[in-house]
Image (tube, grey):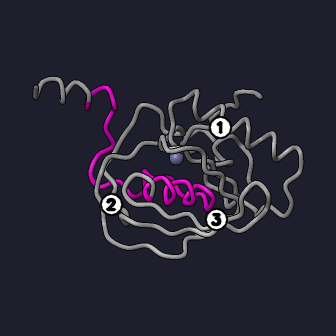
Amino acid sequence: MALLEIREYGKDDVLLKVCKPVKDLTPRLKTLIEDMYETMYDADGVGLAAPQVGVLRRICVIDIGEGPVTLLNPEVLETSGEQTGNEGCLSVPGKTGQVTRPNYAKVKALNEDMQEIIVEGEGLMARALLHEIDHLDGHIYVDKVEGDLYNVEDLVEEIDEEE
Ligand code: ZN
C-alpha cells in the first residue's frame, strides 16, 4: 500500500477531464483502490475519486464512518429532496463552501468483484456519492458553491467567537 499524491484544483487539469469506464479490474487497479483508501483515510477525507490521484478511471471510494464503499462505473439512478450544507474536497485543501444537493441518492455501480450493487444514502452519504461521481465527469464542487469559498480556519475561528 502507498500514499498517493492528491491532485489540487487549479494546479492539475486531470481533475477537469471525463474518466473512462473500468472494463476489468486488473491487479493494478485493485492496488490503486487499496492505495486510494489509504490516501483518503490519511487525509481525513470521506471520499476520493480516481482523478484526484491522477487516474482517469470511473472509480471512487467512500467512507463516511459507516465502512468502506467502492464504486466502479457508478451511475445515479434517482435523487430526491434537498440539503444545503458545507462541503469540502481533498483537491481543494483548506477550503469549504455551501452547496445545495439532493438529500437522497440511489446509485448503481460495480463492486470490486465486478458485480452490480445498488447504494443508497441520505444526508452526508448522498452528498458524498454525488460529490465523488461529479469528479468522474470533471466537475468540482466549487462550481456549485453558493456565495464565497471560505478558508476552513476562518470558519473555525468564527465558530469559536460565537461560543
Ligand atoms: Zn472532491
Earlier in the chain: of badge 3 and badge 2, it is: 3
Residue topped by disc 2: 100
**Disc nearest the viewer among 3 and 2:** 3
Does residue 60 appear to the left or right of 126 in the view shown?
A: right
Q: In which quarter of the image is the C terminus?
A: top left
Indicate the position of residue 1 as horizontal and vertical percent values: 77, 28
Amino acid type of the residue tagged 3 in the rendering = Pro
Above or below for 89 versus 75:
above
Give the spatial CA distance, label 3 vs label 1.
Answer: 17 Å
Q: Give the residue pinned by disc 1.
A: 37
Q: Which residue occupies the extreme left position in the image?
A: 162
Q: How many labels does the image show?
A: 3
**Residue that label 3 marks:** 74
**Range covered by the magenta-colored residues:** 126-155
Task: Give the Cα separation between the discs numbered 2 and 1.
Answer: 26 Å
What percent of the width, then of the height, locates residue 57? 74, 55
